[in-house]
Amino acid sequence: STLAVGSALFIFCYLSLHTGSVLVSSGALFLSMLSIPAALVTSIRISGSGRISGAYFLSLFLIVGLGADVVIVFITFWKMWKPSATGDDDQAVRILYMYKHAGFACLATSLTTSFSFFANLLSALRPLREFGFFMGLCIMYTYCFLFFGLPALLALQEQLKTSQLVRILHEMLQWLKEIVMQPPVQELYSQVKERLGSITLSVTRNAESLLVKYSWFSLFGWFVTIIALLIWTVKAAELDSGLPPMFPKGHNRHALSSVSSKFSTAEIPYWLSTKDGICFVSQEMVPRSRNPTSFGCSLQWCAASGSRPPLPIWGHAAHSNGSAKCVCKPLQPMSTDCVHSTTTAQARADIRLVGLQSVPDSFWKSDTWSGYVRAAVQRTNGAALDAGQVTNSGNASALGTLVQEHWESGIVQSAPYLQAPATVISVTLQEAGKVCNVAEDCYCGTPACDLPEHAQDVPPDKMLSFEVPGTEERRLRWTSSDMAIPKVIHSGRQLEAVSTEVAVFWGMKIRGGAPLLGELPKDLWAFDADFKISLPSVQRHLWSSCQKLDTQKLLVNGNQCWIRMFRNWLRSDGKLFPT
């Protein structure tokens, strides 16, 4: 606001000295600034939008300057008019003379300037279109108001020259001119002008002689300079995506970019948020007797063990025959997991597998599994008991995805997380004592988790292990993706920790388009009548889009496809898909 007032005062003082009339200068400024509300009302009525951006306030600077340009041209031709010998209708003839010479000249400049702003209507940015339309209207309104109002002010000024007050003001302005342009000042001005003219003439003659003497070299150098500047411009030019400099120095809009440049971009893993259903694999966070999904855990997280990369891998992901070797880490039994008994008791085994997507159902009834469970019970409780019959109930259940992060290096891996079936072991005690349940994590081709409740007194060579056989189908699937060592996830994008839901629609189209001016219509979308979901080709396309969804690259925690549920419903009823 201070700059705007200062620019208006400067133009007012300059016009007052140029015209010799305070009335004409103040009236011309009022007519010029009157175009701003007129253009604003017109643009609002046409566009239907009442929003005003900060760029609209720049119009005051432009209109004051452009209006002063029109005023100076009009007044110049007003002063150039010479009265006729008869003196009939001198005032009317003088106004017509001004209209004929100044009116058409200023009309051409006003039209070209306004059209340059109207060209912004071709922009894809709505604020830029609206501002260009508004400024074009301001310029044309300024010309029209001055065209019809300025002659009346000049005629009124001529009539008021006979009044005493106006005559005194006019004489004061003439006196100021005489003070500024006294003879010593005029003589100094003439000498400086003459000296500068002689220097300019000498430089020009010398330059002309050099250009004539070395004309071909000058022409060649000119072309080389132009080409070099064009190449430099293409290499150095960058698209400025920031805001126009409409805010003062030190404003937050400017300080934000300078402060942000001092910080490097940090990679924010998508699992570092408990708001997104991320749970720590720990007895303190999620009791092992409960399924993590009942706690709202879509992902589990643990710190990967190892002093430095490369991280040690426990077990093997897949052999040539599709089998996998799992190495198990025991957990310290909690006080609530132990009971006192005299002769016989039952112990539960809570075993979780990391790195296996699925396990054949026959494995849980095999001697390999039973032998491992008995050995785990004896290792947990010591040699003072005999492990007998092993009973399994239920099936293995997927616990989702386990994210393993090496805290020091930041290396991250993800692996499938599987809960073995509920297993009960009958034990016989040699003497009265306590019997504790078994809790172990088995790693099949992945790094191990570093949990506080892991038993620290078990050396690595005493870790129990077992092999999970694989079928031909599992061998092909595991060796391609599931059983391979999980890829390290390094997100090149800075993502927010809170999850976002993305909805994909088919059969929709845009109704018309965005208007040239104003707000977007509320009914922008409509159903596409050409979208025929009854066609088998359309159903295949929808099914393909769900099947080819790259959940790992896009960091998808879960997805629901209607076409997948529709396909399963058809096939469960013995019907073909697509239908």
Image: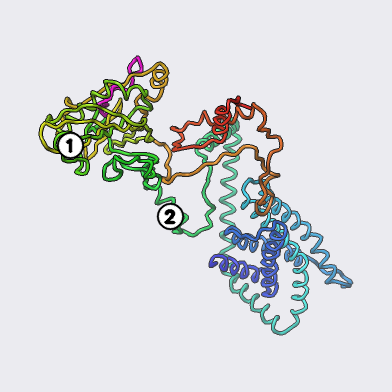
Q: Residue at x 89, y 72 (%)?
A: 86
Kindly give the residue lying farthest to the left in the view shown: 431
Q: Quadrant of residue 571?
A: top right
Q: Which residues are magenta?
A: 310-327
Q: Which residue is mark 2?
A: 255
Characterize the local packing of mark 2: few (<14), some (14-19) or many (20 or more) Cα atoms within 10 angstroms: few
Mark 1 packing: few (<14 Cα in 10 Å), some, or many (20+)?
many
Mark sitting on residue 435: 1
> Which secondary structure lies at badge 2?
helix
- Image coordinates of residue 91 in percent, x first then y, are 83, 72
For this orientation, the residue located farthest to the bottom is 164
Vertical placement of residue 112 versus 11, above or below? above
* Amino acid at pointer 2: Ala
Check the image and name the residue furthest to the front: 343
Rendering quarter of residue 576:
top right
Amino acid type at circle 1 is Val
Q: Nearer the viewer, residue 556 or 331?
A: 331
